[in-house]
Amino acid sequence: MRSLTEILTERISRGGPITVADYMAEALFHPRFGYYTTREPFGSAGDFTTAPEISQMFGELIGLWCAVTWAAMGRPARVVLAELGPGRGTLMSDLLRAAGTVPEFLAALDVWLVEASPRLAARQADTLKGRDVHWAERFEELPAGPLLLVANELFDALPVRQFEKRDGAWVERMVGVTEHGFEFVPGPDAEPDLPAHVLAAPDGAIAETCPAGQALAAALGARLAESGGAALIVDYGHARSAAGDTLQAVRRHRFHPVLEMPGLADLTAHVDFEALAAAARPARAWGPVPQGAFLAALGIETRAALLAQAGGPKVAADLAGQMRRLIDPGEMGTLFKALALTHPALPAPPGFLNP
């Protein structure tokens, strides 16, 4: 059976170098050999661990965030609750459990998971067994009406284009192939859609754009402005657009060479929250705020204390460790950020004081 390395080598040998975005898309989403098509990436047995897998508190607090935001929306009798990139369904499971503390909110929910991978959709169905949940392959397939949407570590997995400043001009960074394997090579001249301060970067600088992420943010912003609602995006990245090569590969919880073994390692790039917020207009953007500050504002310390009371010393120690990983600046507390998008008429959502 052919490997993805062989398929990409043949493609590049015949047609010339491909964009970084094309390489990333094939490595992650190839229908037979893509990373998300073939692998179980989450948890200690996979390649990385996300916040919902670290602690139930993460999803529970987001569930309460959704309930408070629903109340600010005027308590609609029916609201679409959707998650993009739901992983194993852990976040949604914890979210719905917390939503059960507000029965009127739980009864109003029309729950949807947006998932393109049949393997992951089956895993989500198992996690959410007994819940009334629906699946869609694309955001545009969600039913009409007011929307509450959550996306945790989704945007970082969307393919990015990379550009390099050479002799005062920008060229697209491409992926070529030699006898030694894949390598980055300069491509055609380019005029990347980037802010002036990024375009002014010196020679040798690398800059990135995420067309798929910006298109999704634009569709989401238009939906919120038209139908009402709010979205919560949690991911790692930078608050302001900046130059830098952030493309990375992770395999078995360790960094891995980006261009080695496509399809067998996770590929991600840091999210440009400034670009997402701009693309989502006319929806209103709030934040981004550091994940640690966001979860603290939602009451993670109080939640941990309540859970600790119900357990023993070991439970309390475990909860303290989980909370530290989520909010400590040296762990996920600073690099990870939360961005909210809302209908322009809504007030500041929980955890966000200023637009």
Image (cartoon, rainbow, N blue to C red):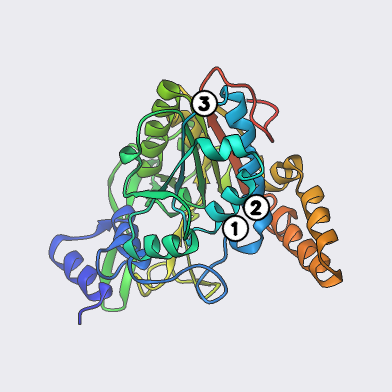
Q: Nearer the viewer, residue 334 or 76?
A: 76
Q: Are marks 2 and 1 in contact (CB under 8 Å)?
A: yes
Q: Is residue 172 left or right of residue 274?
A: left
Q: Nearer the viewer, residue 226 or 195?
A: 226
Label 1, label 3: how many angstroms apart (C-alpha)? 27 Å
Query: Residue 216 is drawn in which quadrant?
Result: top left
Label 3 element class? loop
Q: Is residue 9 above or below residue 130?
A: below
Please name the residue shown 69% across and 42% down the image.
294
Q: Tell how many labels.
A: 3
**Quadrant containing the C terminus in the rendered view:** top right
The mark that comes first in sequence, 1 or 3, is 1
Q: Nearer the viewer, mark 1 or mark 3?
A: 3
Q: Is residue 28 above or below residue 265?
A: above
Residue 228 point in image, percent of width and height: 47, 24
Residue that mark 3 sits on: 76
Residue 52, numbered label? 1
Any part of residue 239 in sight:
no
Q: Is residue 93 left or right of residue 138?
A: right
| Residue type at the position of mark 3 | Pro
Residue that mark 2 sits on: 58
Residue 260 point in image, percent of width and height: 38, 73
Q: Is residue 137 above or below residue 105?
A: below
Q: Residue furthest left?
A: 14
The mark that comes first in sequence, 2 or 1, is 1
Any part of residue 167 in sight:
yes
Residue 58 point in image, percent of width and height: 65, 52
Residue 104, numbered label? none
| Residue type at the position of mark 1 | Pro
